[in-house]
Amino acid sequence: MSNCAVVGINWGDEGKGRMVDLLTADYDVVVRYQGGGNAGHTVINDYGKFALHLLPSGIFRPGVVNVLGNGVALDPENLWKEIEEVSSRGVKISPENLKISDRASLLLPWHRMLDELEEKRLGDRKYGSTKQGIAPFYSDKYQKKTVLAGELFYPAELREHLAELLEWKNLTIERVYGAEPFTMEGLEAWLDSCCEKIKPFICDTRAFLRDSVKDGKSILFEAQLGSLRDLDGGIYPFTTSTNTIAAFAPVGAGCPSADIDRVVGIVKAYSTCVGAGPFVCEMSGPEGEALREAGGEYGAKTGRPRRVGPLDLVATRYGVELQDADEIALTKLDVLSYMDRIPVCTAYKEGGRMIKDFPFPTLLESCRPVIEYLEGWKCDIAGVKSWDALPRQAREYVEYIEKAIGLPITYISTGPERDSVIFRKEARR
Ligand code: GDP
């Protein structure tokens, strides 16, 4: 059976959750391989509307096994809250359909606090973190200063390990930030509450995935954020703290032997970007406000207004390259229905030269967008389910994008609901 990665091509919030929810119908296992509770994957289905933060978006499909791989930032407190909340709305979650890697590192109680303290220290120069502790967590993971989920099964050794980390981390908390130190009692309370609750889900997911591959099961890898937030290829330092690209999926999932047969890149019909950092094609004023309102562009996790702009073909081509995408799912096409003409950013201008290749991050601040316009369709296409039912101008917009990025658009989403989608199998090469 084939394995697939569903990844964001741009800055995140492209509608990955919505596409994974749709595509899981064809897969046996769904794995989140990076990132943490800072995600906000919006899914609307028979159970209602959800913003999933850590749970894989396959959790709604009976028979699908969902895995949180070793690459995720496992926040026991938020994960347990999310499990309780989603379960309370009729979704069955048990160790049968949710498995947490024993090698996932735990986001410790001080990581969120350190995220907040650092953003406060930075003031105007802040990164625009979601303050979920993700950057401090990954720094500590790579310094080998956190604990693995599997350590919860070895309480004596775990307490010794935590006491060592506590002593080390309090040096930073007290001496660098002048904040209140953490105590072992506080950590005990954390262990007794949320950590105990998630314990039944923790297992050797590497072995589970290895056997799944051997048994011919199909795996869907679900990314968080998009190419331009990739730690290595993105707009550093305004990236996330992990690798969002498909090539990292087998590593972060904990099944390095799995081949990815198909990479579906998610592109929104226009651009959005949350937080600080360069965003060349940003639209401001009433034009930007109108697009933000039409698309409901407010963060699923934080409620922050997202920055908006036209589709950026320079960034999108680069994102496609980083992901090595095979095909594209274009989302939120319906949002553009109000526009008389559709703006597209086709190139950047930098110091008198025209740039078509995504530049080194430092140069982005001095880049200006080159905008071209396509004809708008000016009629509501929300919920349209067939290619032929789309107005000519909307079809031309889709074909224009396909040509500009050199990939087929095999899905077009025309609404947030599971079935508001156009399947274009004929576009697949
Ligand atoms: P993700 O993190 O990539 O899953 O994206 P988000 O959930 O943060 O943002 C996508 C938003 O767009 C959510 O509110 C979705 O419900 C919504 N959405 C997804 N696809 C469509 C679509 O085709 N049309 C409209 N109008 N909304 C959509």
Image (tube, rainbow, N blue to C red):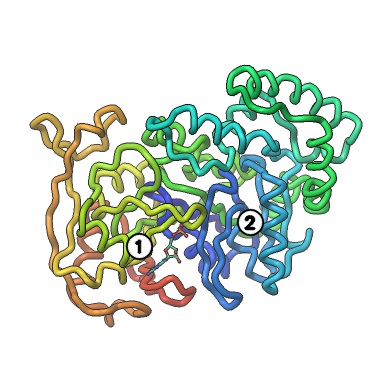
Q: Residue furthest bottom?
A: 389
Judge from the rendering whether residue 116 lies leftward or rightward of residue 421; answer left or right.
right
In front: label 2 or label 1: 2
Q: Position of residue 310 (x, y in %)?
A: 24, 55
Judge from the rendering whether residue 228 lies leftward or rightward of residue 375; answer left or right.
right
Nearest the viewer among 3 and 347 is 347
Nearest the viewer among 342 and 411 is 342
Q: Quadrant of residue 71?
A: top right
Q: Helix or strand or loop: what does disc 2 sit on? A: loop
The amino acid marked with disc number 2 is Leu
Label 2: which residue?
55
At horizontal 29% and vertical 57% (from top left) the residue drawn is: 270
- Mark carried by residue 330: 1
Judge from the rendering whether residue 275 lies leftward or rightward of residue 407; answer left or right.
right
Q: Position of residue 245 (x, y in %)?
A: 47, 43
How far separated are the C-alphas under marks 2 and 1? 23 Å
Q: Residue furthest right?
A: 156
Q: Are marks 2 and 1 in contact (CB under 8 Å)?
A: no
Rendered view: 413 above or below 248: below
